[in-house]
Amino acid sequence: MTEKSADPPGITQPVPRKAPGLVLHSPRFYDLTVRMFLLGRERAFRERLLSLAALRPVERVLDVGCGTGSLAILAGQQVGPSGTVVGVDASPEMIARARRKAHRAGSKVEFREASAQALPFPQAQFDVVLSTLMLHHLPRPAHAQLVSEARRVLKPGGRLLVVDFEKSSAEKPRWRALHQRHGSIDPGGMVRMLREAGFDVVAEGQVGVKDLIFALATTTDRAPLPT
C-alpha cells in the first residue's frame, strides 16, 4: 500500500518498516535538547553542516533521520525553488512536527516516516544525502546498512555527508558516553565504512562544534565537487 500524496517524481512511500536502534518520539524534548546542546546557536550550526555538504541550487537532497525538520527546511532554502528536499525519520511524532514547521515556514520540503535502513526510494534519486547525528542512535550493524542505503539512492557522483559524535576516550567527560549506547564510531572506522560501501572520502575532520566529526564522501564514479 502506498500513501496518496504529492510525491516528487520517482519517489514512492511504502509502509515504513520497524527501525532498529533508538527512535526518539518526543519532538518537544528533542528541540529543547538541541537548543541546550548548541547554546541557542542552532542556525549557525546547521549552516555549518550544509556548508560542508556544499549544496547547490536545483539539487535533490535527502535528510536521513531528519528529526523535527529544521536542517531539511534550511537545506530547502539553499537549493531554491528548483531543488527538492525530502526528510525521513522513523518517528511519526517527529515527522508531524517537521510538517508543521515546514507549513509555518512556507517550505515545500517533503517529510516521510521511514527507517534509515530501508529508504522508500528507487535507486539514484538524490544528489546529496545528509546523515547528521544519526549513527549514535543505531546499533553497530545498522551503521553499514544506513551507508549502503545512502549509496543506493544517490545518483552517480552524488555526495554523502555523515556527522556524529567522536568516539570518547578515557580522558573525555563521561556524559559523552551517553551518545554511544546505541553504537559509536571513530573517525578511522567511519572512513573505512564509507570506502567499503563504494564511496570516495574527499574530506573529513572536526565540525568545530563540541566533539562532532564529519566525513564527506562521493560515489566512486564522482563528478567534481563545486569550488
Image (spheres, helix red, strand yellow):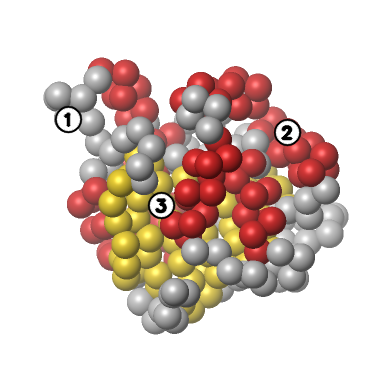
Residue 40 position by quadrant: top right
Q: Position of residue 126 (x, y in %)?
A: 58, 68
Is 106 in front, or is 112?
106
Is 173 in front, or is 43?
43
Q: Which residue is mark 3?
A: 162
Is 30 in front, or is 114?
30
Residue type at tag 1: Ser
Residue at image x 48%, y 49%? 48
Q: Is residue 97 left or right of residue 204?
A: right
Q: Which residue is mark 1?
A: 169
Q: CA distance from mark 1 to mark 2?
A: 36 Å
Q: Position of residue 225 (x, y in %)?
A: 44, 75
State if disc 2 and disc 1 touch (CB < 8 Å).
no
State if disc 2 and disc 3 touch (CB < 8 Å).
no
Q: CA distance from mark 3 to mark 1?
A: 21 Å
User: Which is nearer the N-term, disc 1 or disc 2?
Assistant: 2
Dot 3: within a 10 Å radius of its alpha carbon, few (fewer than 14), some, or many (20 or more) residues? many
Q: Which residue is mark 2?
A: 97
User: Which is nearer the N-term, disc 3 or disc 1?
Assistant: 3
Residue at image x 64%, y 70%? 57
